[in-house]
Image (cartoon, rainbow, N blue to C red):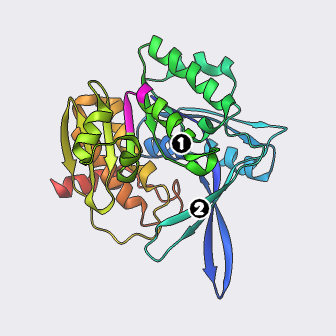
Amino acid sequence: MVICVGEILADMIAQPSDGILTYGRYAGGAPFNVACGIAKLGGEAGFYGRVGDDLIGDFLISFAQGKNLAYCNVKKLPDRNTTLAFVELDGDGDRHFCFYRKHTADYCFDEADIPEIIEKANIIYVGSLALSEERGRQFMDKLIAAAKSAGKKICYDVNYRDDIFPDAQRAKEIYAKYIGAADIVKLSEEEVALFSAKGNIDDAVKELAGRDKLVFVTLGAKGSLYCLDGKISRVGAISLRPVDTTGAGDAYFAGVLSVLDKNGFAAAYDAARTGSICGSLTTLGKGAVDAFPAGEEVQKLISMLK
């Protein structure tokens, strides 16, 4: 099982109409998106996170309970708010967003729950939003240490956001630490340049992968690449006109992890191909979880591409 640990929040996606901008409410948060994506593909997935004691928190708990997760530990914290992400889309469906994150629950985890997570998971996804807070980092550090002691894999999707840290340099230092700790890492093409001084992307990814990591990089319309055992391989993209790119990277990683959890690192190419298909199909609808394709749809497209 893949258990995703981190933020669950509401994506408030802008919807302009007749000169008025309204916001539609969608369940989101990268770790939660990935867990739901794996489950929808037919994989075994779990999620661990926290929400505030408010209307959005109630909505998210109810939503999570209906997503066929093999493990779901989402609780309300009475003295906290639920995190919101306001999202606006440009003409190409690309997103621009800001977080409403004041005294929120997304990083307030209980260390007593770590043994349960370790026992159930084969792969543990570490969410990045909680890493902006000392309390969140302390929990993740203990979770990672326990996972490594138990022989479990750690995966980390960078999701670089310098606006949730005091400054960009501090953000890079923290993100780099967790890239180093992970066995499976996903970055965007832009993020690779932040964490490696190498001018060539292949050399940069090899540097980040080192000797034993499996690193995936999303390349937008160019598809994706991955590095395994010092070798770079590429997978092409599917050409579609996007409606909303929110959650496309999460869909990609859900596709990747659903394959790796069943078949291990040797299936890296199939994982990247499945991820590319999931990411592309998700852009055809609004919202990350709501737009995620079903396993049958993905398998049908894989069969057509053979």
Residue 178 forms part of the magenta stretch: no
Residue 181 forms part of the magenta stretch: yes
Q: Give the residues in magenta.
A: 180-185
Residue 150 placement, left or right of 116? left
Quadrant placement of the N terminus = top left
Determine which of the numbered discs, if any, sits on residue 169 in the image.
Answer: 1
Give the vertical position of 178 relative to 285 (above or below): above
Q: CA distance from mark 1 to mark 2?
A: 21 Å
Q: Secondary structure at mark 1?
A: helix
**Residue at the spot of label 2:** 97
Residue lying at 18% horizontally and 57% vertically, measured from the top left: 305
Give the vertical position of 238 relative to 125 (above or below): below
Residue lying at 63% horizontally and 83% vertically, measured from the top left: 17
Determine which of the numbered discs, if any, sits on residue 277 in the image.
Answer: none
Residue lying at 71% horizontally and 49% vertically, measured from the top left: 101
Residue lying at 20% horizontally and 32% vertically, measured from the top left: 230
Residue 173 or residue 160, whichever sits in front? 173
Q: Secondary structure at mark 2?
A: strand
Image x and y of residue 287, in percent:
54, 60
Q: Residue furthest bottom?
A: 18
Q: Residue furthest top?
A: 149
Q: What's under tag 2, amino acid-wise?
A: Phe
